[in-house]
Amino acid sequence: MTTSKVFNPETLLHHTEQDEELAYQLASMGKDDMPDFLEKAEQQFEENLSSEAARSLHSLKGVAGALGAERLFENSLECEMLLKEGGDREETACCLKQIRREMESLFSDPQFLRFSNDGTL
């Protein structure tokens, strides 16, 4: 059984063909964009716009996957599926909270910070 990581730098470097400068740029952009996707999904969920919230989470999931944020990717996928399938609102709300916690974990991960801050801590 594999254990998902908060951040897997190998994935990010794979997506950038080992270009660290590009990896820094993507991580920085992801750090800026992912909170917006989550806030939008939370707002859409509160407004009972499930398909729109699922699309926002799909965008978040894509960024998380490209960056190597494995646990954030998995939680985003789970919540996206709950929204698409008309899952329980309470379960979906808990899932959204878990996504926020995973994002906070990612943004405090020293390895991720190295990339998202242009190589400096």
Image (tube, rainbow, N blue to C red):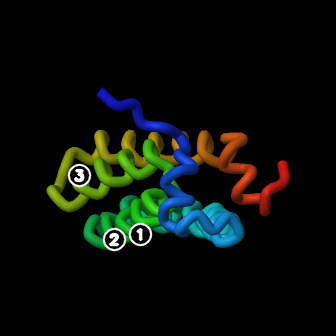
Under mark 3, the amino acid is Leu
Under mark 1, the amino acid is Ser
User: What is the secondary structure assignment of the residue under circle 2?
Assistant: helix
Q: Earlier in the sequence, mark 3 or mark 1?
A: 1
Q: Nearer the viewer, residue 17 or 94?
A: 17
Up the image or down, 110 lies above or below 46; here it is above
Up the image or down, 12 lies above or below 22; here it is above
**Residue 52 at what x, y percent from top left?**
33, 72
- Residue 32 visible (yes or no): no
List the residue tagged with mark 2.
55
**Residue 97 at what x, y percent from top left?**
47, 43
Where's the N terminus, which quadrant? top left
**Residue 37 at what x, y percent from top left?**
50, 67
User: Distance of mark 2 from mark 3, alpha carbons?
Assistant: 12 Å
Q: Are marks 2 and 1 in contact (CB under 8 Å)?
A: yes
Q: For the point 27% across and 47% down, which residue is it? A: 89
List the residue tagged with mark 3.
82
Q: Nearer the viewer, residue 52 or 11?
A: 11
**Pointer 1 local density, CA inside 10 Å: few below 14, some 14–19, many at least 20:** some
Q: Quadrant of residue 46?
A: bottom left
List the residue tagged with mark 1.
59
Determine which of the numbered discs, if any, sits on residue 88 in the image: none
Under mark 2, the amino acid is Arg
Of all residues, the one furthest to the top in this rendering is 1
User: Distance of mark 2 from mark 1, alpha carbons?
Assistant: 6 Å
**Pointer 2 local density, CA inside 10 Å: few below 14, some 14–19, many at least 20:** some
Q: Are marks 2 and 3 in contact (CB under 8 Å)?
A: no
Q: For the point 23% across and 55% down, which residue is it? A: 81
Q: Is residue 99 left or right of residue 107?
A: left
